[in-house]
Amino acid sequence: MAEIRAVTFDYWNTLMVHDTAASRETRGRLIGEALTAAGSPVELAVISAGFDVVSERFDADWRAGKQFALPEAIRLLLTTIGADRSPAAHAAVQDAWLVAGKGSDLAPVESDLGGTLEQLSSSGIGLGIICDVGLIPSTVLVGHLERFDLLQYFDHWSFSDVVGCYKPDAAIFAHSHQGLGIDDPAEVLHIGDLRRTDVAGAVGFGCVAAQYTGIVNDAELILGSPDPHYVVESHATLPEILTKHHR
């Protein structure tokens, strides 16, 4: 059995978690203010309904492996809610969306996550991130890690808006391993909350797969999808899991 030399982490619900309802409320309020300032006021309930349309489109494209970026999402939102679609309005709404994404309704999944990452890093384990970005760009997500003093522990990160594909595509795992200097996928443990993307992607690429259930216990079963090698409820158990795996 190969020795684990690196651990890669999913981002959402594996490293960081956010208050979805609070984030949606803030985003709706800021977009409403931006549209009013642009002379195209829209009721918050209508904006909220527009969010549902955008979310459904993103989910469908994500599952199909098709990139759906923020500018396209803003165009869809403005069209759906019948708002001004001028370049100035588009820019104002996109800025409001990004400001909402930089809000404070986000935190590490565990209070001592930094301690676990420091323990792994100090033991010589390389640490990476493999993340399917939603409609908040990776530059903002990296900023959140910096705000909580977590980015310092990571040696490399692979975000879908940079790599150009989503998990379980092998290309995003290859990008991560190249950045970490790993040639043998069996020397990497990937941990994430979703079976379709994290577990299936990791196993398909030849990695050791761990499903993180500390926030979401995903039970979505795709026909023929593999089971994780490990189920992890707390990141604090990762050092012990790596020790046992090496035996």
Image (cartoon, rainbow, N blue to C red):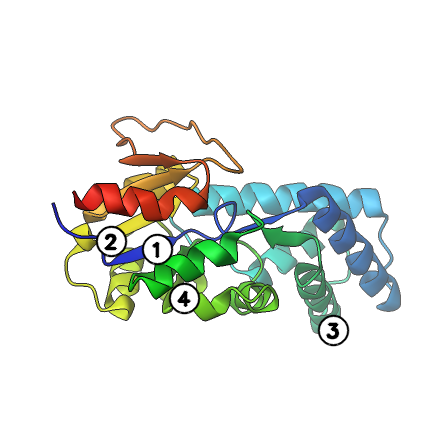
Badge 3 element = helix
Residue 122 screen position, x and y as percent: 36, 65
Tell me the residue at 36%/63% (across/down).
121
Tell me the residue at 29%/69% (across/down).
179
Disc 2 target residue = 188
> Looking at the image, is mark 3 or mark 2 earlier in the sequence?
3
Disc 1 target residue = 8
> Looking at the image, is mark 1 or mark 4 earlier in the sequence?
1
Badge 2 element = strand
Crowd around label 3: few <14 · some 14–19 · many ≥20 (10 Å): few
Pointers 1 and 2 in contact (C-beta within 8 Å): yes
Pointers 3 and 2 in contact (C-beta within 8 Å): no
Q: CA distance from mark 3 to mark 2?
A: 46 Å
> Looking at the image, is mark 1 or mark 3 earlier in the sequence?
1
Q: CA distance from mark 4 to mark 2?
A: 14 Å
Residue 26 screen position, x and y as percent: 77, 53
Disc 4 target residue = 154
> Looking at the image, is mark 3 or mark 4 earlier in the sequence?
3
Q: Looking at the picture, which amino acid does disc 3 mark?
A: Ala
Q: Which mark is residue 88?
A: 3
Q: Looking at the picture, which amino acid does disc 1 mark?
A: Thr
Q: CA distance from mark 3 to mark 4?
A: 38 Å
- In this rendering, does residue 160 appear at all? no
> Looking at the image, is mark 1 or mark 2 earlier in the sequence?
1
Q: Looking at the picture, which amino acid does disc 2 mark?
A: Val
- On the rendered structure, is 46 left or right of 158? right
Q: Nearer the viewer, residue 212 or 172?
A: 212
